Amino acid sequence: YHDHIRPAPFIAADIETKSNTITEIGFAPSPSRALVIPFYSREAPGGNYWPTAEEEAQAWTWVTRILSEKPSIWQNGQYDLQYLSR
């Protein structure tokens, strides 16, 4: 985060979904770097990537922090942003 996201003037963002649920959110500060925060796992019981609610809350804290600190350019933003507004 500190080496790549923080110094970038803006980020590209994209949300992936499955069955009306966010499966992951990707942030790219440049064409050659990206940070993906997962929320779904096919291997995990119940499909939740994070083993505890506290860990998932921390992941959402990072999503909120990144989106509040940087202007963002969205891939299909009108669709993606409806998921964040929930």
Image (cartoon, rainbow, N blue to C red):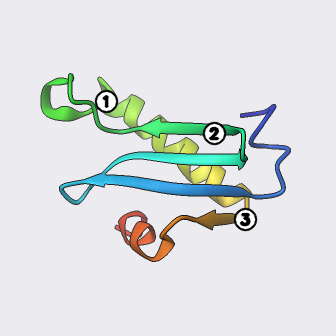
Residue 77's x, y, as percent? 50, 71
> Which amino acid does the dot numbered 1 rest on?
Tyr
- Mark before the other along the chain sequence, 1 or 2: 2
Q: Residue at x 21, y 29 (%)?
A: 42
Q: Amino acid at mark 2?
A: Ala
Q: Residue furthest left?
A: 46
Report the quarter where the C terminus lies: bottom left
Q: Nearer the viewer, residue 79 or 71?
A: 79
Q: Residue furthest front?
A: 31
Q: Which residue is mark 3?
A: 71
- State how far apart marks 2 and 3 are (Cα): 16 Å
Which residue lies most toward the bottom here? 78
Q: Which residue appears at 70% of the width and 55% of the height?
A: 11
Where residue 39 sits, quadrant-wise, is: top left
Could you give the CA–CA distance between mark 1 and mark 2, rounded to whole angstroms? Answer: 19 Å
Residue 34 bears which disc, if any? 2
* Residue at 39% from the left image edge and 72% from the top image edge: 79
